[in-house]
Amino acid sequence: MFGFLNCNKPIGFSSRDVVNVVQGQLSRRKIKVGHCGTLDPLAEGVLVIGVGPAAKLVPYVHQTSKCYLGTFRLAAESPTGDMEFEPTLHMDHPVPSLQQLVVACEKLTGVIEQTPPVYSAIKVGGKRAYEMARQGRDLEMPTRKVHIESIRIVSFDFPNLELEITCGTGTYIRTLGMDLAKAVGTVAVMTALTRTRVGDFAISDTVSVDEIRRNNLESMLLPASMGVSHLPRLIVGPDQCKRLANGLCLGDQQPDRANALDPNAEHIAAITADGRLKAILVQKDEHWCPKKVFPG
């Protein structure tokens, strides 16, 4: 049991609910499980779950870009920024043009500062922000830098706006929609959100929660190497695999960085000729040495 489940999380399920379903299928076996990026219960789509030793790769999957389809209602607002509460409509707000929205999207791409919503799972002073917000407490949310690769307007028929957003980890899509609305002189609530991709894991290849319940988990696992496809890679042979399994460093071979998102990445993936992930390597004294070693 070593790989990833690409699950299509349904609306109404928390990410933890899906993990519980997976763990329920493994109840007789002590196998680690971890999800790669929380989706709110009101959202649906790709939820990548590491099973077995692949649970150790969750931080690496977090480094990959994510793609979302989000729909928003302009000239409307709610305490949560979504449809958890009945939104207040503002009939007197201006109607932005498509060109105004396009310009605002361009200004919100790249590295930007974002203030997470009060109703979020971020911890403030050791407590979940949404728990304190529901208690009526005033919170000052810390800003964070996030990377927005692109924002594309899929459709616009006021007051409804649909966006395709490609971004890095830690981005709050509802906040991005609210910031976009503010830039054109109005407000917005997010009415629906679907995560369509996480790294190489696409929504077209997902399995449902019902399929996880019915079928053999091992038959649905995707290769662990998919979770580190963004890292430079070094192809290792049988002798090198033995060295890595014994915790020994390799020679001074250089990894293939042609397809890496970050050519200066500190970690590289040791991959066998048939595509199996053998180890995550770091450089020590000009040699590549194992940080994490995997079975097989």
Image (tube, grey):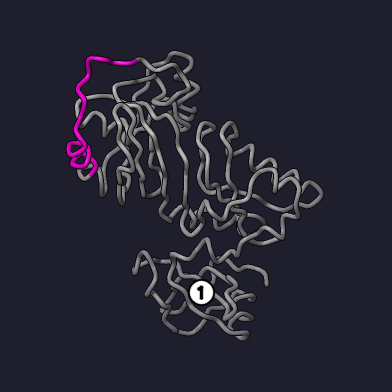
Q: How many marks?
A: 1
Front-most of residues 76 and 144 = 76
Label 1 SS: strand
Quadrant position of residue 93: top left
Query: How far from the left and from the top, in percent, is residue 286?
Result: 41, 79
Query: How far from the left and from the top, in percent, is residue 205?
Result: 56, 55
Q: Tag 1: Cα neighbours inside 10 Å, few (<14), some, or many (≥20)?
A: many
Please name the amino acid that badge 1 sits on: Cys
Query: How far from the left and from the top, in percent, is residue 63?
Result: 43, 55
Whether 154 is among the magenta residues is: no
Query: How far from the left and from the top, in percent, is residue 183?
Result: 20, 32
Front-most of residues 20 and 253 = 20
Whether 99 is among the magenta residues is: yes
Front-most of residues 16 and 193 = 193
Q: Is residue 126 above or below residue 152?
A: above
User: Disc 1 marks which residue?
Assistant: 289
Q: Is residue 251 above or below residue 206?
A: below
Front-most of residues 146 and 75 = 75
Q: Is residue 265 above or below residue 207?
A: below
Quadrant including the N terminus:
bottom right
Q: Which residues are magenta?
A: 89-105
